[in-house]
Image (cartoon, helix red, strand yellow):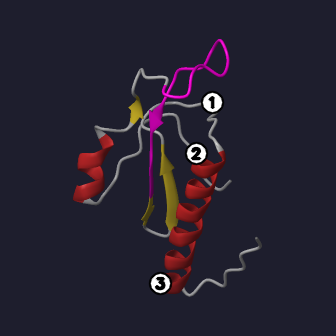
Amino acid sequence: MAHHGQENFKWQEDALRELQGQLGGTDKFPQGKLTEDDEGEIKMAVAVQGKKVIVDFGKPTAWIGMDAQQAADLAALLIYHAKELAKTSGQPLTVFI
């Protein structure tokens, strides 16, 4: 990956800045606990800032687990934003599925 950080991401867009306070752990376990160190449900954002697709977890996160639908939804969001970014930046984009 080209970039990563330990501190909360600083969104430039107002709508995403407002959303940032809602990201992170919810202290809920809607699908049960996967492992002993499972911290539960996490709310995250996927968006474009500048010339990068950003995934913001709202907190330092070592791993995430998701069911098939959640994984497909995340993949679709990443592909959607990648295509939009490629259109505006003129970058060639190849998506293999």
Q: Which residues are magenta?
A: 30-46
Across and down, in percent, residue 51 comes to 49, 70
Check disc 1 and give the amino acid type. Ala
* Residue 4 image label: 2
The residue to which callout 3 is attached is: 88
Across and down, in percent, residue 5 comes to 54, 40
Q: CA distance from mark 3 to mark 1?
A: 32 Å
Check disc 3 and give the amino acid type. Thr
In the displayed structure, would residue 89 be above or below residue 36? Answer: below
Could you tell which of marks 2 and 3 lies nearer the N-terminus?
A: 2
Residue 92 in which image quadrant: bottom right
Check disc 2 and give the amino acid type. His
Nearer to me, 2 or 56:
56
In the displayed structure, would residue 40 be above or below residue 47? Answer: above
* Secondary structure character of the magenta stretch overall: loop
Across and down, in percent, residue 40 comes to 51, 24
